[in-house]
Image: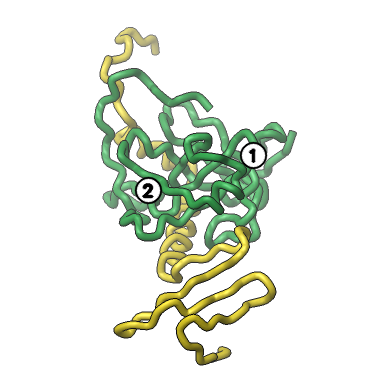
Amino acid sequence: MLVLTRQVDEAIMIGDAVEVTVVEVRGGKVRLGIRAPAAVAVHRKEVYLAIQHANQEAAQVGPEVLRRLPAILPRPAAPPPASRKE
Amino acid sequence: MVMLKTTRFGEITVADDRVIVFEQGLLGFAGITRYALLDPPEGAGPFAWLQAVEPGSLAFLVCDPAPFVPDYRVGVRPEDLASLRMGDVSEGLVRVIVTVPKPPAPVTVNLLGPLVLNLRERLGRQLVLSDSGYGTRHPLMPAAPTSAPAGDGGR
């Protein structure tokens, strides 16, 4: 891993398009400003990992899950017509 | 028409204009950018499938959050709106991804990383609602009775 020392208001460039600036250092916390093209997603890593994990878990669903859904479907206030032929 | 060979639904065809491009993919599935939002199965209410064009093994169960989380707020950054070619989030369709664990664990939805779809431009994006307080495992409880039948809002 590349390690660089920077002071407040100094920045690093990642490629031509991504700029990371040290905005503030206080009490063990570093505030960073990130300028990046819209096509580059910037997230806190723990949030990124949480969503990635949730997506991977969600992708395991099979079509049979629909059987579990009626219990949580929104119920219309008015009951449907009672007559039903089998 | 696009022919999809899916593991869950067999071979299905969808109209070209039903294929939605997620330019960044979904988190954890970066290279997979083309999905089809399949019509909700009969009786599935606010649920639908987001099926990847390729691979056919990848699909997500998605859900309209409105009946379950009426006060859900999706704050979309201007950059995200621009990439979706939308002026306001109300022009798009918000869907959340459903996780169905083994019973008795509750069915949950991911409110932290919603999907916003612009069906007109056929663009989609998974947002990250940092600092929103929302989590990835919001239990999906039976929704309150709705006053009007099936207010799905069409498509």
Outermost residue, right side: B1
Which of the 4 image quarters holds residue B120? top right
Q: Are marks 1 and 2 in contact (CB under 8 Å)?
A: no
**Residue at left offset 44%, top offset 60%:** A51
- Chain for mark 1? B
Going by the numbered disc 1, the residue's amino acid type is Arg
Residue A63, label in figure: none
Chain B colour is green
Residue wearing tag 1: B122
* B1 sits left or right of B135 in the view: right
How far apart, in angstroms, are the residues tagged by discs 1 and 2? 23 Å
Outermost residue, front side: A9
- Chain for mark 2? B
- Secondary structure of the residue carrying numbered label 2: strand
* Mark closest to the chain's N terminus, 1 or 2: 2
- Residue B124: percent from left, percent from top: 58, 46
Determine if residue B135 is in view.
yes
Residue B109, label in figure: 2
- Secondary structure of the residue carrying numbered label 1: loop
* B31 sits left or right of B136 in the view: right
**Mark 2 Cα within 10 Å, few/some/many (few <14, many 20+)?**
many
